[in-house]
Image (spheres, grey):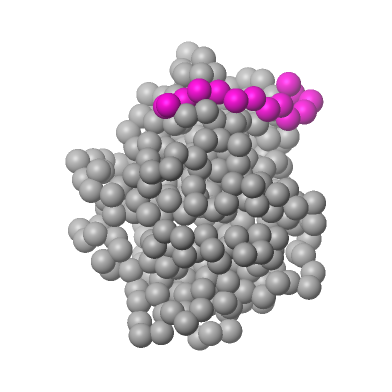
Amino acid sequence: MADHVTHRTIETNGIRMHIAEQGSGPTVLLCHGFPELWYSWRHQLAALAAAGFHAVAPDMRGYGETEAPPDIDKYTLLHLLGDMVGLLDALGEERAVIAGHDWGAPVAWLAARLRPDRFPAVIGLSVPYAPRRPARPTSVMPQSEDAVFYQLYFQQPGVAEAEFERDVGRAMRAVLCGVSGDAARGAMDAGAGRAVGMVPRNGGFLSNRRDPPLLPGWLTAADVDFYAAQFARTGFRGGLNWYRNIDRNWELLAAFDGVPVGVPALYIAGDRDPVVKFPGMDQLIPNLTRFVPQLRRTIMLPGCGHWTQQERAAEVNAAMIEFLRSLPARS
């Protein structure tokens, strides 16, 4: 298994989940975000395998070759955490270090908070751990007369799906390139003079994202084709349903308010990532140890955008492997 990526389907938490895996040794579970797939971790699978780890990257619930339940309320963070616990059970593994990027990061942070017995260390990429806020999340998301925060735009079923699915190839190119570090400006505020993450009311998410004439060096036409083929087949609804549970997650996790991330942790982001420009991140990120007391390092990659592990594979791989090797050996 160490020489190449293998694929199989496992049963977990009532769904069939596709996983890609490579290598043997201690397991590292890799959770992707939106709009991505197991393929987002292609560079890490090989590097972790070569370093003596068993790297496992699932298509998360609603994505790729994994099942996509039709009901919106089947995409809460508790469902997603249950999927990851069930994945470990299907692998016959007691424990695994869990890593997550974008929406996969909240899954990873929650796994480390609530099930440290199964996930004894965590790596977050792009999205830092964020404590629960006192107000319902969608009630405090920014909006104005002419624009709304992109997560509000995603709330109405069918709207973003129609926009993205009109031309999947163009949508993938625009999203992947637009928030990459190679973009002249972050796509979420490109050319419109709007705050980061705002979508014009008289347009859509892709309104300010041009189809790039050239792909950045970290992204090939074959990469885009892989993503586009999968999303052309599945559509985007499964991934968008994660956003439609933001308020439900806030309600379901109220009982765990104040519980810290108590395991060793690593946080990696790009300094051109729009996520780190969101309001409040300038205060949260420098003070992460208040909520993640065993945070070993915060690594901010100069010139890197949102697609951290794809844009800067070598640096991310090195940081992950260094962190993994620093952890105590399993008994």
Residue 205, horizontal then vertical, whole percent: 52, 70
The residue at 70%/72% (across/down) is 211
**Residue drawn where x is 47% and y is 25% of the image:** 12
Residue nearest the viewer, comparing 227 with 323: 227
The N terminus sits in image quarter: top right
What range is drawn magenta here? 1-14
Q: Nearer the viewer, residue 88 or 221?
A: 221
Q: Residue at x 47, y 54 (%)?
A: 240
Lateral position of residue 13 relative to residue 308, left or right: left
Horizontal and vertical percent for residue 189? 53, 77
Tally of marks:
0
**Residue 134 visible in rendering:** yes
Left or right side of 147 for 274: right
The residue closer to the viewer here, 141 or 47, is 141
Residue 4 belongs to magenta span: yes
Q: Position of residue 83 (x, y in %)?
A: 44, 31
Q: Would residue 282 appear left or right of 175 to someone viewing this image?
A: left
Please say whether residue 269 is one of the residues in the magenta stretch.
no
For image coordinates 75% across by 53% down, the residue present is 225
Question: Residue 262's quadrant in the figure?
Answer: top left
Residue 226 placement, left or right of 29: right
Q: Is residue 261 above or below residue 1?
A: below
Figure check: 38 above or below 15? below
Figure quadrant of residue 41: top right
Q: Is residue 195 visible?
A: no
Residue 151: x and y, percent?
41, 63
